[in-house]
Amino acid sequence: MAIDPKLIEFTEDEKELLRSRHEQQESLLSPYACKDEEGLRERMENYQDPDVYLARPCFVVDVEKIVHNPFYSRCADKTQVFSLIKNDDISRRSFHLQVVSRVGRTIGAALGLNLDLIEAISVGHDLGHTPFGHRGERILSDLYHQRTGRYFNHNVHSVRLLRTLARTNLCLQTYNGILAHCGEKTFLEYRPKPCPTFEDFDQLLENCYTDQTNIRDLRPNTLEGCVMRISDIIAYVGKDRQDAEKIGLVSAADFKESSIIGTQNREIIYNVTRNIIKNSLGKDYIAMDEEVFEGLDALKRENYEIIYNSEEVTKSIDFIQPMMERLYSRFIDDLE
């Protein structure tokens, strides 16, 4: 039975109360935060009514468009690092998305930023990952490049899934944060880089398809995107260590002690998060102490040496590559 439309319409008094509460919340935001009214969509026809965001603010809509999407659901079966391990306790992509969101919201709340935008970027940033992690991504990129001269990158594909295939009509700020999230390189400071229009955004996308080095130069266009980018690193550095210990690949003793930020997941999240807040309060950029930056970067390098380049992780390449090559050829044949 359909609900009577009158039951879900707000009265004028209710509308005024909702507006007042939203204005109070926005008044507490940093002057460097991205406000909801700044949200820019490609198709604005359904968002002309000023009351459309009354109960669901602009970037809350983006969060819900992402988490209710089938592409988000598919992340539940993709492990984060260890592709061929049967263990319910190790991280899946969907869990990683939530941890990034949690870390980002903690930092964003302390800095007075837009938490809904941080969450939207966080839950959408890795939807374009292939199975078998970055190794699967490199195999697919090589196959794609051989055929087209273009490159496949999971951050670009995350945007493509949401924008082109699912037609979610997210805000530019959300798409941009997803595109520029790449967390493979750590920086001492994260400063937003303007991208005011969808035309500018399309050029960024095209540059990534045609020149692999462009990925390294991407910067989010909001401070919220910068928070999510560093939160991505904080979320996986310690958790990947925890997962490696869980499957017996390493023990805690195999990791070098860091007197600055620790080596355990809980220590890394607590110490780096607090240091970022301490160094970023009242500023238009995100920063950390140089010692903390060096400590985080050192832990990342150690993860590559001990975990990501271990035989347990790399051995799967022997059958992953021919399998993906055959699948790619078959799909191309079907298309042609």
Image: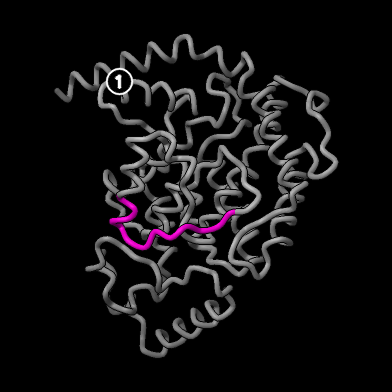
- Name above or below for residue 70 compared with residue 171: above
In which image quadrant can residue 143 be found? top left
- Quadrant of the rendering where the C terminus is positioned: top left
Percent x, y for residue 207?
Answer: 34, 42
At horizontal 52% and vertical 77% (from top left) the residue drawn is 26
Percent x, y for residue 82?
Answer: 57, 24
User: Would you say 240 lies left or right of 322 here?
Assistant: right
Q: Indicate the amino acid at tag 1.
A: Gln
For the record, the magenta segment spans: 190-202
Residue placed under numbered mark 1 in the picture: 146
At horizontal 41% and vertical 14% (from top left) the residue drawn is 321
Name the residue at the bottom extreme.
13
The secondary element bearing badge 1 is classed as helix
191 is within the stretch colored magenta: yes
Percent x, y for residue 283?
Answer: 63, 67
User: Would you say 108 lies left or right of 40 here?
Assistant: right
